[in-house]
Image (tube, rainbow, N blue to C red):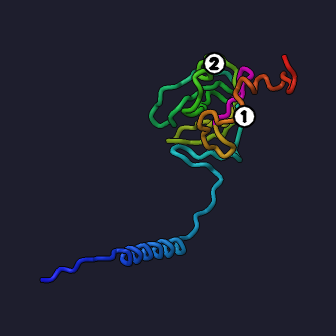
Amino acid sequence: MKRSRITNPVPILAGLLTSLLLATFAYSVDTPASPVSHAARGFAAPYDAAKEITLTGNVQEVVTKHAPGTPPGTHLLVAGPHGIVDAHLGPNLSKDTQEALHLGTPVQIIGAMATLHGKSILLARQLIFGGRIVTIRSPHGFLVQGRQPGAASSEHQRNAGTESNGGSR
């Protein structure tokens, strides 16, 4: 029995890659386009910017321990005009912001209501309290990943209206 040995694998590899490329192209041409949705979807509930609300109330509880059936991260239970609302602030809230939130703190939260596992929660996009403006989500509902380079800090935003540019102190 004679064994044949491949001495030049380049033509075989080129043929395999070409076949793979053609198969991928043929699949993508036949696949129908999915409908476009403006609601952000992640591991949790969708964020619908068209249904944003502003909630004004007082903090009843700050929950940092994850509970089953809720998105991970900090939650604020806020007493508003329609009762207690669970506001999801996400996992990226700074330690100083968490420490500044306590029972009775007046807050304003801009976000969209969503239902997750049969429970209504407010997906917070922006949290305003004590002269601070804290951005939690982008306008499309995606969680902000901490402080981005060049982003204004809460302290800067608080003092922005009282400082002048270009002068010395």
Q: CA distance from mark 1 to mark 2?
A: 21 Å
107 above or below 120?
A: above
Is residue 102 on the magenta stretch? Answer: no
Taking the image as shown, residue 25 lies to the left or right of residue 162, namely left
- Magenta-drawn stretch, dominant element (helix, strand or loop): strand
Number of labels in the image equals 2
Mark number for residue 44?
A: none
Write down the quadrant of residue 100 in the picture.
top right
* Image position, residue 82 (x, y; %): 67, 30
Write down the quadrant of residue 1 in the picture.
bottom left
Label 2 belongs to which residue? 100
Which residue: 59% across, 26% down? 94
Q: Secondary structure at mark 1?
A: strand
* Quarter of the figure that contains the C terminus: top right
Over which residues does the magenta segment extend? Answer: 127-136
Which residue: 54% across, 33% down? 91
Mark number for residue 54?
A: 1
Q: Which of pointers 1 and 2 indicates the residue nearer the eye?
A: 2
The kind of residue on which mark 1 rests is Thr
- Nearer to the camera, 156 or 15: 15
